[in-house]
Amino acid sequence: EDMSKSRREVLADYIVAHDNFGKAYVNRIWAHFFGRGMNEQAAPDDFGGHNKVIHPELLEKLGQEFIKYKYDPKLLIEWICNSEAYNLSYVAPNKDMSKPEYDVYFARMPLKAQSPEALFESLTTATKADMQVDKETRKANREAWMDKLVRNFGDDEGNEMTFNGTIVQALLMMNGKELNDEIKRADGLVAKTVAKGMKMSATARDQFMIDEIYLTALARRPSTAMIQYEKIDAKSKKKSVLSATEIAFVQSQLKAAKDAGGKNPQAVYQTFFEDLFWTLLNTNEFMLNH
């Protein structure tokens, strides 16, 4: 025994020398980028003989190379991110391969939910909340937000859990006081955008408002892709599913807001912006791939 080493150093040597260390480390980093490990069961920390490895040759090779190059995590990340699997489209090559049971074969690049930290940063950027507060206030807001996310989506021990677009998550997003306050702030993003739009002609204002909402929330303009949406009949209260291009749907929503908004155009645009902005912030495109 080397008495010159501390107990922690001895323990570290023992862990690193274990046959599973390289493979377990690779599996965790792989799961960070793909949303699941190479095992039959998705959880990356559930590693061992009881959880069958579906890609043993790949995991063995990556584990060996990781050890060979002195446990360099930057190299491991480079290998994974340059892999064919990582650069695949999220669209499955056929209908069958889109089923969850085929995810372990990595025939497509699955959309991965944001971590609580990334979600906070994305929401802060989208609402431009970081432009309204000083460094200490932003830090306090982040800690409060993180505490709420872990409390709502963590396990009984307070450990962070993966986001997966649950109803609870959507409700927190829609009803959270912090996010509501930022969107409704008198000197915030929505108010400033509406005020800027009111100085334009009616036609230019409509396009400006729609583009600003999409660019701010999703970093793109509305497309001509077909989407499905629900509509409730005002009289019968029956719900129907309709199809339209994304841009046509948004324009119809703006028209409906104008028809119901009365004679105060600023209030109409304010409501339209808030409603559509909320909708986009709760889409999978924002939550999973922002």
Image: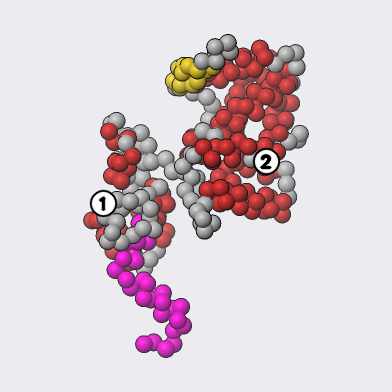
Q: What residue is disc 1 on?
A: 54
- Count residues near mark 2 (Cα–Cα under 10 Å), then give few for <14, some for 14-19, many for 20+: few
Q: Is residue 224 visible?
A: no
* Magenta stretch secondary structure, dominant: helix
What amino acid is at disc 1?
Answer: Ile
Q: Position of residue 287 (x, y in %)?
A: 51, 39
Question: Between residues 78 and 39, which one lies in front from this camera angle?
Answer: 39
Q: Say which residue appears at 62% left-offset and 27% top-offset.
A: 275
Asked if the magenta segment contains residue 47, the reply would be no
Relative vertical location of residue 188 with respect to residue 229 in this rendering, above or below: below
The nearer-to-camera label among 2 and 1 is 2
Label 1: which secondary element: loop
First to last magenta residue range: 1-27
Asked if labels 1 and 2 touch by Cβ distance under 8 angstroms, the answer is no
Q: Say which residue appears at 48% left-offset and 39% top-offset.
A: 165
Q: Which mark is drawn over residue 177?
A: 2
Q: Which mark is drawn over residue 273?
A: none
Which quadrant is the N terminus positioned in?
A: bottom left
What amino acid is at disc 2?
Answer: Lys
In the rendered image, the residue lying farthest to the front is 236
- Label 2 – label 1 distance at C-alpha: 44 Å
Relative vertical location of residue 120 with respect to residue 91 in this rendering, above or below: below
Q: Position of residue 11 (x, y in %)?
A: 41, 77
Its colouring scheme is: secondary structure
Q: Position of residue 265 (x, y in %)?
A: 73, 17
